[in-house]
């Protein structure tokens, strides 16, 4: 296994367990609220439709899971899977408040080894989670395996700006400001220092597109947000 994240998986899980109660607040602070805009734009571009079955990996506190649930409607269903039980507790509360328990199932599990048969879902998503798994290539292969032929695999992830000036500002922000905000807002300097490091060390948008193709996906393309600070990748499983 060629690791794309060298931080031990149990340590990553502990980090997300610890920051779960402040995760939404910190996401808004770090992205200046733009993560919601990114997700909304992705939802408008996806091929998801009423009655579909969707799988949301590394679902965290459930924001994308709920957006998918609204898109599939009462005739569809969404599974939100995450390895952090504390994150899933936060997601469960959101699902209950949104009154979407009829179409959402939350499950603790490993994105590296999905507990579903081949060709099970119309859409499989992962938001801000691919950089945190041990082997992103293995996760993409699993996503491609469980999506139906003609179905879509979608990854929304932080990225690295290619413009040198923007990249320098990005490095300063994520390398120094984000960990300090993690200390002030969430009282977890080390956790948010890890998050910025995992972003910095992750592959480029072009490399991730290549990984999509190597996982067996076709029609691979991506769109960047905020001058490259984030990107969404799309891939379709061939018939």
Image (cartoon, rainbow, N blue to C red):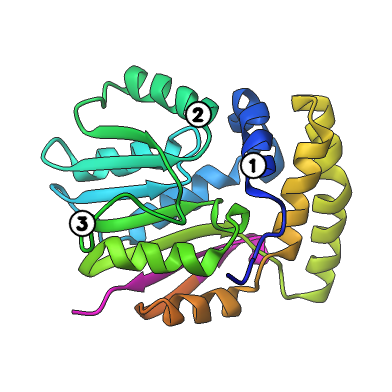
- Residue 235 drawn in magenta: yes
Q: Is residue 74 left or right of residue 193?
A: left
How many C-alpha atoms fall within 10 Å of the one at disc 2: few (<14), some, or many (≥20)?
some
Position of the N terminus by quadrant: bottom right
In x, y percent, where is residue 90? 49, 24
Start-end of magenta stretch: 223-239
Seen in the picture, residue 220 relative to 44 is either above or below; the reply is below
Question: Which disc, if any, is residue 222?
Answer: none
Residue linked to disc 1:
10
Residue 28 visible, this orientation:
no
Q: Is residue 10 left or right of residue 215?
A: right
Residue linked to disc 2:
85
Helix, strand, or loop for circle 3? loop
Which is nearer the N-term, disc 2 or disc 1? Answer: 1
Residue linked to disc 3:
120
Label 3, label 1: how far apart the Cα atoms are: 28 Å
């Amino acid at each position: 296994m060629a690791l794309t994240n060298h931080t031990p998986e149990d340590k990553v899980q502990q980090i997300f367990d610890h920051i779960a109660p402040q995760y939404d607040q910190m996401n808004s602070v770090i992205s200046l609220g733009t993560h919601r805009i990114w997700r909304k734009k992705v939802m408008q571009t996806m091929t998801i439709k009423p009655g579909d079955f969707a799988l949301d990996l590394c679902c965290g506190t459930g924001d994308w899971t709920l957006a998918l649930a609204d898109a599939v409607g009462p005739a569809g269903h969404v599974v939100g899977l995450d390895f952090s039980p504390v994150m899933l507790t936060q997601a469960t509360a959101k699902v209950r408040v949104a009154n979407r328990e009829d179409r959402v199932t939350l499950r603790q599990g490993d994105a590296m080894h999905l507990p579903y048969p081949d060709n099970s879902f119309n859409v499989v998503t992962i938001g801000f989670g691919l950089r945190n798994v041990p082997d992103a290539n293995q996760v993409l292969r699993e996503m491609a395996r469980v999506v139906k032929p003609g179905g879509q695999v979608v990854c929304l992830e932080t990225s690295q700006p290619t413009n040198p000036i923007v990249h320098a500002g990005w490095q300063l922000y994520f390398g120094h400001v984000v960990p300090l905000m993690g200390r002030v807002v969430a009282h977890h300097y080390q956790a948010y220092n890890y998050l910025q490091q995992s972003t910095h060390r992750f592959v480029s948008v072009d490399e991730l597109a290549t990984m999509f193709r190597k996982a067996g996906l076709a029609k691979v393309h991506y769109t960047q947000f905020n001058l490259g600070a984030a990107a969404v990748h799309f891939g379709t499983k061939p018939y």
